[in-house]
Image: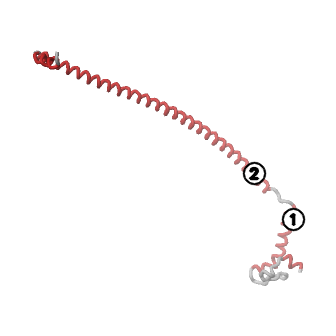
Amino acid sequence: MAAGGGEAEASRRPWWVVASLLEAAKAEVTNRDRQLKMSSYLAQEVHLARRHEEILSQRSVLLQQMETYLGDKKTKKTWQTQAADAARKRNAALLNDIEAAEKKLQERMCLLPHPDTVNLETLYWASVKESLPKWEQFLLGRAEAPVGFKKLKTTKQNLSYPEEDSQN
């Protein structure tokens, strides 16, 4: 049978048979389209499943990093608290030492000075009381300097000290 004979045969068929054949062909094309769509959906589903696994893996890594970070942060906070406590104790001890030293110094100040110092102080004030009447009028600006006091010119060449003058 020739290829053209099939067409002639199809033209002799009744219209309802041709219509049913067309519907069958149409259904077959629709089935192929569905299969193609299904395979496309299947490929998308596989792609989405892989992407889902990647996201879950990333989430797991991030959770682990977060736990590590929080653990490190807690450890650091504990260390800082211990360091602050140690510093507080050290500062309290230093403050106690300073207060004790201050107390000792105050007690020393209340003690009587050395007898030689007291003797010198007494002699000094006695000398001042003895010479005060001689100097009183001079210090008030009413009289000349008392006898035995030389007015010195203050130049570099003749600067001298009272001990040197008494030796001359």
Task: Say which amino acid is labelled 2.
Answer: Ala
Q: Badge 2 local density, few (<14 within 10 Å), some, or many (20+)?
A: few
Q: Quadrant of residue 44?
A: top left
C-alpha separation, residue under disc 2 versus residue under disc 1: 29 Å
Looking at the image, residue 33 sits to the left or right of residue 58; the answer is left
Work out whether 89 lies above or below 120. Answer: above
Q: Badge 1 local density, few (<14 within 10 Å), some, or many (20+)?
A: few
Comparing 157 with 145, the one in front is 157
Q: Can residue 80 be seen in this view?
A: yes
Of the two numbered discs 2 and 1 on the same chain, state the one appearing first in sequence.
Answer: 2
Q: Position of residue 70 (x, y in %)?
A: 54, 35
Which secondary structure lies at badge 1? helix
Residue at 60% across, 37% down: 78
Q: Where is residue 164 in the image (x, y as percent from the top left)?
A: 86, 77
Q: Position of residue 89 (x, y in %)?
A: 68, 43
Q: In this figure, which residue is indicated by the disc labeled 2?
A: 101
- The label number, if any, that marks residue 119 in the structure image: 1
Which secondary structure lies at badge 2? helix
Q: Position of residue 101 (x, y in %)?
A: 75, 51
Q: Which of marks 2 and 1 is in front?
A: 2
Looking at the image, residue 21 sits to the left or right of residue 110; the answer is left
